[in-house]
Image (cartoon, rainbow, N blue to C red):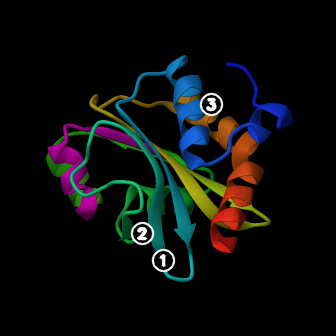
Amino acid sequence: MARITEESVVAEADFQALGDHLVERLSSVMTFQRFNIGLIDPDRYIFTDAYVSGLNVAGRVTGHERTLDGTVVERAIRAGDGAFFGGDAETLLKDFPRFGPVLESGMRSMMAVPLRRQGRVIAALVLASDREDGFDLAKLKIVQDLGTEIVDRIAALINERNES
């Protein structure tokens, strides 16, 4: 997988372009049906979709806000550098009460990698698969490394968004 250099990131003008670039890179090394970049507001304890690609999940489009409480992203933040989960519908709903719309779309596993800048979680990369075993430690490491590469660009895009 090609590394994102400062020059290639500068060309990514917004979340859409950056997200499309990340989907292209990740698709070359793993299979998934949905990818999103979510912005984290720890003070309000919410996750806002800044970029969404792939299979539709009812109500979860760019700009959608939801609580972090009871989510895969919350669990990934608590785990530290990310986590992945999969299984049957009953188990997933028990572990993640807000997983219903994702299950209804056909997803059976998810991975979330929180992005930290200066010790604060600012965003998360989230992938979903229609396979119960869609993710593993090797794939988690790939997404973690990618997150490390792009966290400064995400922070810059957040700042640009807040200034406009």
Which residue shows up at 59% across the image and 24% down it?
A: 25
Q: Position of residue 128 (x, y in %)?
A: 37, 38
Q: Which mark is residue 68?
A: 2
Q: Nearer the viewer, residue 13 or 126?
A: 13
- Residue 5 visible in rendering: no
Say what amino acid the circle numbered 3 marks: Ile
Q: Nearer the viewer, residue 17 or 23?
A: 17
Q: Are marks 2 and 1 in contact (CB under 8 Å)?
A: yes
Q: Specify few, some or many for label 1: CA neighbours under 10 Å numbering under 14, 14-19, or 20 or more.
A: few
Mark closer to the chain start, 3 or 1: 1
Residue at the extreme right:
6
Mark closer to the chain start, 2 or 3: 2
Q: Position of residue 66 (x, y in %)?
A: 36, 69
Q: Quadrant of residue 6?
A: top right
Give the quadrant of the C terminus.
bottom right
Residue at the extreme front:
164
Pointer 3 residue: 142
Q: Position of residue 52 (x, y in %)?
A: 42, 45
What is the spatial separation of the Cα atoms under label 2 and label 1, in whole angstroms?
6 Å
Which residue shows up at 41% across the image and 62% down it?
A: 63
Q: Check if residue 103 falls in the magenta segment.
A: yes
Q: Which mark is residue 45?
A: 1
Q: Above or below — where is 138 with respect to 61? A: above
Mark closer to the chain start, 2 or 1: 1
Give the quadrant of the N terminus.
top right
Q: Check if residue 37 falls in the magenta segment.
A: no
For residue 164, side relative to residue 139 (left or right)? right
For residue 162, side relative to residue 72 (left or right)? right
Residue at the extreme bottom:
43
Q: Which residues are magenta?
A: 97-112
Q: Secondary structure at mark 2?
A: loop
